[in-house]
Image (spheres, rainbow, N blue to C red):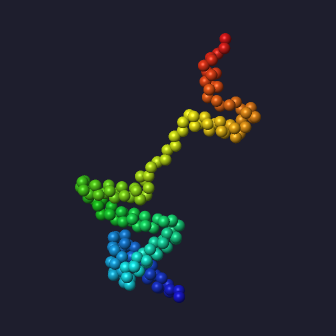
């Protein structure tokens, strides 16, 4: 049986309230009692359904719980920020912990991948490319480091 537009709107509104309560830190039991769910399990299922629907609609992968945690961090940061900006050392420490947690969730602290190339590796790559292109057959002189060095050390003839 398809729900009427009014029922769909009521369900969407209740799900929105449930998500807001969860972001604010409410337990599923508290959500169930406040919004008339039959149990904490049904409240949990409805919140998950809403988050999954959001994920599908927005084309996000498994970001629903991350988004929930980021929203919670936003709420906490808004609450502590005025005291931190006023110079309260405990508030500053708390704000930094919130910022650190957000950076971890977003992957901002992940290691930077560096590729180190040595002269030998570059020479090997050049030789491989020359072989692939058939550089010798095209009359392109080889880019051999030793040949270049030998020419430089001999100096002008005469």
Return the residue found at the far right: 137
The residue lying at 40 percent from left, 73 percent from top is 19
Of 150 and 22, nearer the camera is 150
Report the side of 110 relative to 157 (left or right).
Answer: left
- Examine the image and state in which quarter residue 42 appears: bottom left
The residue lying at 47 percent from left, 65 percent from top is 63
* Rendered position, 131 above or below 34: above
Of 106 and 144, nearer the camera is 144
Q: Position of residue 155 (x, y in %)?
A: 62, 17
Return the residue found at the far bottom: 1
The residue lying at 37 percent from left, 72 percent from top is 22
Q: Position of residue 122 (x, y in %)?
A: 59, 36
Q: Is residue 25 visible?
A: yes
Q: Position of residue 68 (x, y in %)?
A: 41, 67
* Rendered position, 112 above or below 129: below
Report the side of 55 relative to 152 (left or right).
Answer: left
- Examine the image and state in which quarter residue 16 appears: bottom left
* Rendered position, 65 above or below 37: above
Q: Position of residue 15 (x, y in %)?
A: 42, 77
Q: Is residue 16 visible?
A: no
Report the side of 7 relative to 127 (left or right).
Answer: left
The residue lying at 26 percent from left, 57 percent from top is 91
Q: How many marks?
A: 0
Of 121 and 7, nearer the camera is 121
* Rendered position, 60 above or below 45: above
Q: Tell me the quarter of the image containing the C terminus.
A: top right
């Amino acid at each position: 049986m398809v729900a009427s537009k009014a029922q769909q709107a009521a369900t969407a509104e209740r799900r929105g309230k449930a998500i807001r309560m969860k972001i604010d830190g409410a337990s599923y039991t508290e959500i169930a009692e406040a919004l008339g769910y039959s149990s904490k399990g049904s409240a949990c299922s409805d919140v998950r359904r809403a988050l999954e629907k959001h994920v599908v609609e927005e084309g996000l992968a498994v970001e629903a719980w991350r988004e929930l945690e980021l929203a919670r961090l936003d709420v906490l940061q808004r609450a502590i920020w005025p005291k931190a900006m006023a110079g309260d050392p405990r508030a500053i420490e708390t704000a930094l912990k919130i910022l650190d947690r957000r950076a971890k969730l977003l992957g901002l602290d992940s290691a930077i991948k560096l590729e180190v190339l040595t002269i030998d590796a570059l020479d090997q790559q050049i030789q491989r490319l020359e072989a692939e292109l058939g550089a010798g057959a095209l009359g392109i002189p080889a880019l051999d480091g030793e040949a270049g060095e030998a020419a430089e050390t001999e100096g002008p003839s005469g």
